[in-house]
């Protein structure tokens, strides 16, 4: 048995190290270390609850809107507000814009450049991947970054700025949309749609969203050359390397539901396992275990009763990340989980066949472009200039509330307790906290730790399969430790 430390990882938001126990050239066990403590829970203690809207976006610069949305939702519950329809639509567009921008960044700048490494020289697709995705030098960065920047102009119109907007409020959106701005927003969405249809997919979003089985996806790919589009090239690489066979974790998938409008949501809430119908999600079943975290030893607690007290000298700890569990189970969250819970048939068939995998996770993100962008167009068309965008209310002296949203990387929750008009407790569980958690008191590894077991590693070569599995979860380590 040998021990290999992989990290720190480049092209990852924050600090990440993975320790692998390797036997006979394969990973026998993995431990994921989030080595940076940040302590936003302590920063928020004692402050006016509305100050959370200023502080929590600073948790992260690439998913700050998600943090704002969760804080606004927790305050909304505390204040008992009902958001006007315009406010719901505006909040959905802002959150969706950030989520799709994150998917875009992940695919073009974080994930695909690994396939332009010299280790893959000689593969039939290598020359195309190298020319397109080689870090800094490939054509994708020069092509994709202007498209992403143009798309994020949505934030300037609806959120004032990005990151760290203050436009998302408990009662909706602080920014009303005029008729002229509505036209501008729709034009920006159509411009981004055009880029996706030309370069990412080489097909209409509706045609991609209509792919409802593995056979349909295979037929679509077989009718096109790998050079046809970036999506088609990804499928070619995945087929050749068997990305559908690596990275399986627990195959228990959690989604809080996303993009609500009235009593409906674009994506459903629930828990899904292969071969079963979605189960209801009960937030009361969430606990956070800190037995292997550098946090003061304590029983597993629900976030409303939770603490985040550092203990850097704790024995047997190896991460600043807590170990959240749902009813005692390790769960996975993210775009794949959202689509599985919502019933996307292609992904359900793929996961029933192969389990959660590198291929399925990336495919889940790409399919969200095809499903979410048309919804954004519909929300913008439905804006009613002149109608309310935000409701007002009073903050009670004693209350508690939770804000559950879907960030790009999955289930994000903010739990807020107000006592005497001040924050008495504020606990956050980020998506990467779920996915990159350490072992719990029973010794059960987290989702990524399980997904790495069995992969080839060791020797003189860089463990590329490990890199692919880690990046398939799209870690955001600064959110993990808040």
Image: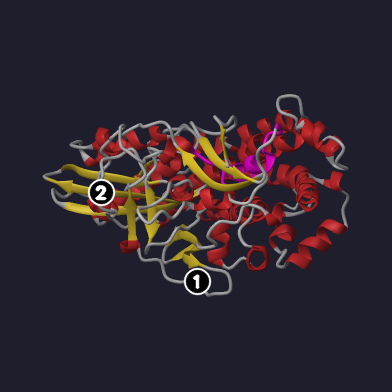
Q: Disc 1 on helix, strand or loop?
A: loop
Mark sitting on residue 372: none
Quadrant location of the C terminus in the rendered image = top left
Residue 16: x percent and y percent? 50, 34
Q: Nearer the viewer, residue 293 or 282?
A: 293
- Compared with 311, 179 (above or below) is below
Q: Disc 2 on helix, strand or loop?
A: loop
- Compared with 264, 153 (above or below) is above
Range of residues picked out in magenta? 460-476
Q: CA distance from mark 1 to mark 2?
A: 28 Å
Q: Earlier in the sequence, mark 1 or mark 2?
A: 1
Q: Would you say 17 lies left or right of 231 here?
A: left
Q: Residue furthest top?
A: 137
**What residue is at 43 percent from the left and 32 percent from the top?**
35
Q: Would you say 407 lies left or right of 103 here?
A: left
* Number of the front mark, 1 or 2: 2
Mark sitting on residue 278: 1
User: Magenta stretch containing residue 167, yes or no?
Assistant: no
Q: Label 1 neighbourhood size at 10 Å, few (<14), some (14-19), many (20+)?
A: some
Residue 375: x percent and y percent? 58, 56
Q: Label 2 neighbourhood size at 10 Å, few (<14), some (14-19), many (20+)?
A: some
Residue 176: x percent and y percent? 42, 43
The answer to whether any part of residue 392 appears in the image is no
**What residue is at 50 percent from the left and 54 percent from the top?**
333
**Circle 2 residue:** 306
């Amino acid at each position: 048995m040998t021990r290999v430390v992989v990290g720190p990882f480049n092209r990852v938001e924050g600090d990440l190290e993975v320790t692998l126990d390797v036997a006979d050239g394969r990973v026998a066990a993995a431990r994921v270390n989030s080595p940076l403590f940040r302590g936003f829970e302590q920063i928020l203690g004692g402050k006016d609850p509305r100050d959370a809207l200023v502080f929590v976006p600073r948790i992260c610069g690439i998913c700050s809107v998600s943090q704002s949305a969760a804080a606004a939702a927790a305050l909304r519950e505390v204040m008992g507000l009902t958001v006007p329809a315009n406010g719901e639509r505006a909040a959905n567009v802002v959150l969706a814009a950030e989520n799709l921008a994150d998917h875009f960044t992940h695919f073009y700048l974080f994930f695909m450049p690994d396939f332009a490494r010299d280790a893959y020289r000689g593969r039939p697709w290598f020359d195309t991947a190298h020319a397109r995705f080689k870090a800094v030098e490939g054509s994708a960065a020069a092509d994709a970054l202007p498209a992403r920047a143009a798309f994020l102009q949505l934030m300037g119109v609806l959120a004032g700025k990005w990151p760290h907007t203050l436009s998302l409020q408990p009662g909706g959106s602080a920014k009303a949309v005029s008729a002229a701005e509505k036209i501008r927003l729709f034009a920006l969405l159509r411009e981004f749609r055009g880029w996706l249809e030309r370069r990412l997919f080489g097909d209409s979003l509706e045609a991609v969203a209509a792919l409802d089985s593995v056979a349909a996806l295979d037929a679509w790919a077989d009718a096109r050359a790998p050079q046809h589009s970036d999506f088609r090239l990804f499928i070619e690489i995945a087929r050749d390397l068997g990305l559908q066979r690596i990275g399986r974790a627990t195959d228990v998938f959690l989604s809080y539901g996303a993009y609500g409008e009235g009593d409906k949501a674009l994506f459903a809430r629930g828990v899904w396992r292969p071969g079963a119908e979605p189960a209801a999600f009960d937030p009361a079943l969430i606990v956070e275990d800190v037995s292997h975290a550098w946090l003061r030893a304590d029983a597993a607690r629900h976030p409303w009763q939770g603490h985040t007290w550092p203990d850097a000298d704790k024995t047997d700890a190896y991460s600043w990340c807590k170990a959240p569990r749902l009813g005692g189970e390790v769960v996975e969250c993210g775009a794949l989980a959202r689509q599985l819970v919502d019933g996307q048939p292609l992904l359900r068939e793929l996961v029933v066949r192969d389990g959660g995998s590198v291929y399925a996770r990336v495919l889940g993100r790409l399919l969200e472009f095809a499903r979410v962008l048309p919804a954004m167009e519909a929300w913008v068309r439905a804006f009613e200039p002149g109608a309310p965008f935000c409701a007002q209310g009073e903050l009670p002296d004693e209350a508690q509330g939770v804000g559950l949203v879907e960030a790009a990387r999955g289930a994000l929750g903010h739990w807020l307790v107000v006592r005497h008009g001040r924050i008495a407790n504020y606990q956050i569980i980020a998506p990467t906290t779920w996915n990159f958690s350490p072992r719990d008191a029973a010794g059960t590894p987290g989702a990524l730790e399980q997904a790495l077991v069995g992969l080839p590693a060791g020797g003189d070569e860089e463990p590329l399969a490990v890199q692919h599995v880690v990046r398939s979860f799209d870690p955001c380590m600064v959110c993990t430790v808040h």
